[in-house]
Image (cartoon, rainbow, N blue to C red):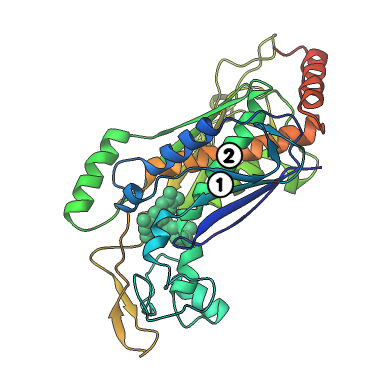
Amino acid sequence: MSLRLATAGESHGPALVAIVTGLPAGLVLDRDAIDADLKRRQEGYGRSPRQQIEQDRVEVLAGLRHGRTLGTPLALVVRNVDHKNWTWGMSPWPPEGDPQGKGTKPVTLPRPGHADLAGVLKHGHADVRDALERASARHTAVHVAAGAVARSLLATIGITVGSSVVDEDELRRRIDEARAERDTVGGIVEVRAQGVPPGLGTYAEKADRLDGRLAAAVMGIQAVKGVEIGDGFALAGRFGSEAHDEIRTDRRRDTNHAGGLEGGMSNGEEIVVRAAMKPLPTLMKPLASVDLETGEPAQALVERSDVAAVEALAVVAEAAVAWELARAAHEKFGGDAVGDFVASWRAYVERIGWS
Ligand SMILES: Cc1cc2nc3c(=O)[nH]c(=O)nc-3n(C[C@H](O)[C@H](O)[C@H](O)COP(=O)(O)O)c2cc1C
């Protein structure tokens, strides 16, 4: 059975939910490690005060007993502490009593760069909030929780995943500048995975190529508008002799322009994926928009928002890469019990003589 992930949850609803299916039984999960990833997602220069309200913690409702997976669907929950201020506005059922708290008035001012306009047109919503609550990146919290579970599976076969922000000092300077101007900024993050053996993914079918799957997983994160593998766009301007990584007799490479991926498969070198994040769309000095109720020109919605979320993106992208690598590893090595998964991996690396 392949690893699958489904999520639910609105930004200011009661909670965020993830259901992970296909995990082998006997995988040890560490609550502190999952919570540490959730905390990392909330940190970073340029985040909004929302991050001080939320103290994200994972709860497990199913699929785990005494810290070990049961081989059954794993249900993860991260509660939205801020929901207490939105109990009327985001009540799942028709609210009782007078409107109170936040989210009581319909939003009719779509933000350029956000899901607001296309979201309401597509679904026929009268209130932009009906689109923006889910489009918001708040639910990346449960993707990070699921990524931490994936990371535990990868750890059993020696794969680790980490991330960093490219040009972090320069980014901080730009964040200060943007904050002073009531503007926003984006940036670039890099995810690296070590210990990935050759042969995850395939050249046989386009949809199964690991490079494409990693790119889709990272591009699927809100505000990511560019993804590159290894030297990516720079490769287009080089001669082939400068672009490819020569193979030594031990089958390793001295360079890694390919970012650990050739022919839609891992090649045994470090996997390197970069993502470019656009500036966040919610501006404190709003751009021109339309009032959807009156049809008149208006300024876009101003709502509490981050100036930048690049450091958070690094953690979210790391989780996306971990998830996709775990899925590819589980496809290759299988196993209903984690011991079977590890034994299959061991047999494989022995067969190809990889250490
Ligand atoms: C971790 C993270 C935090 C984000 N925080 C905000 C935010 O505070 N304000 C905002 O306008 N956009 C934020 N975004 C970006 C929007 O969610 C995103 O631009 C929007 O959903 C539209 O999708 P698109 O940019 O992929 O087209 C964030 C994205 C991520 C990954």
Q: Secondary structure at mark 1?
A: helix
For the N terminus, give its image quadrant. top right
| Corner quadrant of residue 150 | top right
List x then y, in percent, for residue 312.
Answer: 41, 43
| Point 48% across, 43% down: residue | 57
* Mark carried by residue 4: none
* Residue under pointer 1: 143
List x then y, in percent, for residue 273.
Answer: 53, 36
List x then y, in percent, for residue 146.
Answer: 60, 42
Q: Give whichever of 175, 210 is nearer the camera.
A: 175
Furthest residue to the top?
A: 249
Q: Give whichever of 154, 66 is nearer the camera.
A: 66
Q: How far is disc 2 from disc 1 in space, using C-alphas? A: 6 Å
Badge 1 amino acid: His
The image shows a total of numbered marks equal to: 2
| Corner quadrant of residue 325 | top right
Q: Give whichever of 239, 171 is nearer the camera.
A: 171
| Point 40% across, 61% down: residue | 84
Vertical order, 346 against 94 (above or below):
above
Q: Give whichever of 342, 170 is nearer the camera.
A: 342
* Residue under pointer 2: 147
Left or right of 135, for residue 2: right
Badge 2 amino acid: Gly
